[in-house]
Image (tube, rainbow, N blue to C red):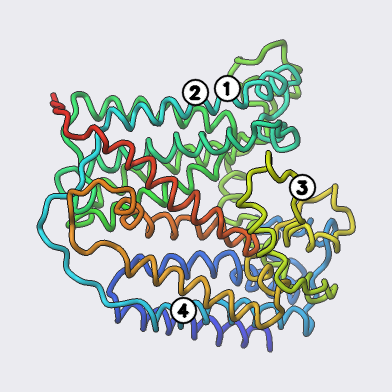
Amino acid sequence: MTFYLTLIISTGLIIYLQMLLWKKTKNFLLVLPTLFLYYWSMLGAWFITYDLFNNNKLENYGLHYYGYFQKLFAIELNGDYLKSIIYYALYIICYQLTCLFLIKKPQEQNGKKPITINHNLVFLISGLSLVLSYIFIRRQLEEASLNHESIYLFISHNNGKFYSLFQLFKSFSVLTAFTGFMIYLDRNQALQIASKPIKYGMVKYLLLITIVLFFTLIIGSRHDIVFSGLFTIIFSFINRKKVSPKNMVIVALTLMVPIFLIELTRAMPVLDALHLNMGEAPKEATQHFSGIQAVTSLVFSNEIFSGHMSMYGAIHYQVPITYGSSFATLAYSLVPRLILPNRPPDIYQHYITIAQNPGVQGFTINHITGWYLNFGVIGVILGGIALGALFAFIWNIFPKNMSEKRTLVRFMMILAIPGFIASIPMIIRTGPEGYKSVILEGMVIPAVLFWAASLNSEKKHYEL
């Protein structure tokens, strides 16, 4: 009963603080970071607690996290697990209190013309990025095809020296395609970033998105679609005078279908199934996969549990505190590997020392656990305050007064909010080192891409 009572009280307090933040800002977007933090940190506790009291009864309803107990470590309803729940709640509450204290009330925007972008440049950036991404991963694609293996699984074990560049340009391609499409749909209602009409715009974007999604489906890359989709939808909330349910549905459906297909097929040799392989496939290579299993896997994702378990593992197995090692790793990561190839281990590598069979099952560390392993309970508090302060800063610098100035800084101010919120699912599965990805990949790179797409925006385009 103690565990349920702790979950009820902490969840109730989190909901209450979120209601106070809503009263202050009246903005739905502020709910999303809290929702993401809760999903990847505390939601799993409800299921695990119920299962441990009821002999894994939820297994009958499609949950499938139980293998972690055998391959990693088993959770018990003891004092260490109670602490882990309290620490997760403490982080979220500190984050909310910081936001409540620092975030300013919204102001009305003026009626000046927004910045305009050139859709032809968006097509060029997205298409060129896709081609480069393919070039960087071509060797792995060929080997996976010859071996009749899942490309997703093959690449995860055979990264190659250009893997980072492959990931980077792949994300460029997906992000510019989706966000450019939303800017096109919202062009008549845009407040911050708009566009000139373009001939056959709808046809061109649908063709581009189809090609981009086909590539991500072959690769099995769900992360880029999730990030780009969240980024695009959140951006539309801040860019339109009035939210368009129609446009939201169009983008959401465009996202949901490939995400479902990726979950269904990424563990299978897709090229064999599509008869695009480079040799004759064995019969077992084209085995059938259940759509019901894919839906269950998405709804009851093991990501709810794998990261959630990390705090219990750190406490129960008394993983040593590193006293700020993540920040040393973060500093080293700012230097290119060509200059500094040897780097200190990150907090994830420190955490997996408790693994019984590290080669059998991958671990996931929760961001809050990363702060705990750096500074103990004080780190949990500091981590929540740091995330809240960063979000409050980003929220407060959003340009209330529109301007046609096409400066990179202005694009960063506009796109920082969708970039930060869409990055929460990414940072919650890393330690404090993840702030580099949030700032660089979530905020700086999108700003650079769309700033580049605005450089020739005065050129006239005509729509059919």
Disc nearest the viewer among 3 and 2: 3
Amino acid type of the residue tagged 2 in the rendering: Val
Check disc 2 and report its element: helix, strand or loop: helix
The residue depicted at 62 percent of the width and 76 percent of the height is: 88
Residue 192 point in image, percent of width and height: 22, 52
Q: Residue furthest left?
A: 111
Inter-mark Cα distance, 3 to 1: 27 Å
**Quadrant of the image containing the C terminus:** top left
In the image, is residue 287 above or below residue 367? above
Residue 326 point in image, percent of width and height: 68, 64
**Quadrant of the image containing the N terminus:** bottom right
Name the residue nearer the viewer: 103 or 323: 323
Amino acid type of the residue tagged 3 in the rendering: Asn
Residue where numbered disc 3 is placed: 342
Inter-mark Cα distance, 4 to 2: 42 Å
Disc nearest the viewer among 4 and 1: 1
Asked if marks 3 and 4 touch (Cβ < 8 Å), the reply is no
Residue 423 point in image, percent of width and height: 49, 56
First in residue order: circle 4 vs circle 1: 4
First in residue order: circle 3 vs circle 4: 4
Figure quadrant of residue 300: bottom right
* Label 3 crowd bin: few (<14), some (14–19), many (20+), radius 10 Å: few
Q: Say the numbered circle drawn on residue 131.
A: 2
Inter-mark Cα distance, 4 to 1: 44 Å
Asked if marks 4 and 1 touch (Cβ < 8 Å), the reply is no
